[in-house]
Image (cartoon, rainbow, N blue to C red):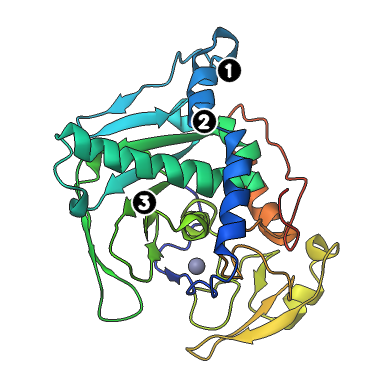
Amino acid sequence: MTLLGHPSPVTFIVPPFSPAGSVHAEGISLVVKSAAISLAAIVLLAGLPGCAPATPTGPPPQSFGTSVFAVAAAKHPNEAIDVVFAPDDDYGDMNDVANRQAFLDDVDGMIQLGFANNQAWSLNAPVVNYWYMTLSGDVQPGAGSCPSVSWPNLSDATFAEVIILLHTNPLRDCAWGNRVTSEPTSYRTVVHEASHAVFGLPDEYCCDGGYWHAPPVMYNAENSCLTDGSNAAWQDCQALTSSDGDEWWRSEDGNCDIMNCGSVHVLEYGPADWAVVEGVLSALPNATISAPSVFAPAEWP
Ligand SMILES: [Zn+2]
């Protein structure tokens, strides 16, 4: 599905992680939370007769072309957010079973310790399909803030809302339209970058991110922020000046959400982010959408 109005020419950048002072504690927390949402359970649910797609299109396809295969795909792609993981060539030849398993183990971690730890993604997992591809790309340090990326042939993945190229070499990740990069243990980064690609959310941190007019999250003028009734429930309009000199107004200033803060763990969306996310999810055919019970700066659980 194509996200109409997506600001494709913008480069998105994620801030460096904050100091990992509580890595151990957060790691325990992540494991506990993800235990309830195992990949095996998702696949099992997808196979139950009562969970057939709501339209008479039959079961969703489990592969596309010769290079894209389902990890957990319960919905037809035109009724779902489709996330496709692609390997960096550092994983080796995907025809080798051990190499492919190593890549899939990392994909599993991205889903269970990344996406499953953000409530908007977790509660709406029934409308999210996860896939992997076997063609490899390459991610290397770039000349500027973003890496230099050689993308594999993506012609089998044209249905994807986001294509995530997993690379094991450490560097700062970015998103370009629906293409993003992530290290396989950057659980917050992958959700942050995918949120740019899938939902068109702007960065909310200062000052070298990607910003655009995206009510009720971000505004190009103070008056637009102050007079938008849709942000009344949380309105706290504050300016940020981007490194290229443009002034933007954020409606939930001070709220440490996944588009604003670095963290060693996955943060929730703020209420403004959710308004945008809900709009995209609700536009999916036959979708029943669940609102998060927790919004940033609170954490889940
Ligand atoms: Zn970003």
Nearer-N-terminus badge (3/1): 1
Crowding near the residue tagged with mark 3, few <14, some 14–19, many ≥20 C-alpha atoms within 10 Å: many
Crowding near the residue tagged with mark 2, few <14, some 14–19, many ≥20 C-alpha atoms within 10 Å: many
- From the image, tell me which residue sits under label 1: 54
Q: Which mark is residue 144?
A: none
Amino acid residing under circle 2: Glu
- Residue 231 is drawn in which quadrant? bottom right
> Looking at the picture, how far across and down is residue 156, in whole percent?
25, 37
Camera-nearest residue between 213 and 24: 24
- From the image, tell me which residue sits under label 2: 79
User: Residue at (39%, 31%) from the top-left corner?
Assistant: 71
> Looking at the picture, how far across and down is residue 247, in whole percent?
61, 86
- Residue 268 is drawn in which quadrant? bottom right
| Residue 166 versus residue 75 in the image, above or below | below
Q: CA distance from mark 3 to mark 1?
A: 28 Å
Marks 1/2 in contact by CB < 8 Å: the verdict is: yes
Amino acid residing under circle 1: Ala
Q: CA distance from mark 1 to mark 2?
A: 9 Å
| Eye-nearest disc, 2 or 3 | 3
User: Residue at (69%, 84%) from the top-left corner?
Assistant: 239
- From the image, tell me which residue sits under label 3: 164
| Residue 68 versus residue 255 in the image, above or below | above
Q: Which quadrant of the rendered structure holds the N terminus?
A: top left
Amino acid residing under circle 3: Ile
- Residue 142 is drawn in which quadrant? bottom left
Q: CA distance from mark 2 to mark 3?
A: 20 Å
- Left/right of residue 257 with respect to residue 102 in the rendered view: right
Camera-nearest residue between 132 and 177: 132
> Looking at the picture, how far across and down is residue 157, in whole percent?
30, 40
- The residue lying furthest to the bottom in this view is 245
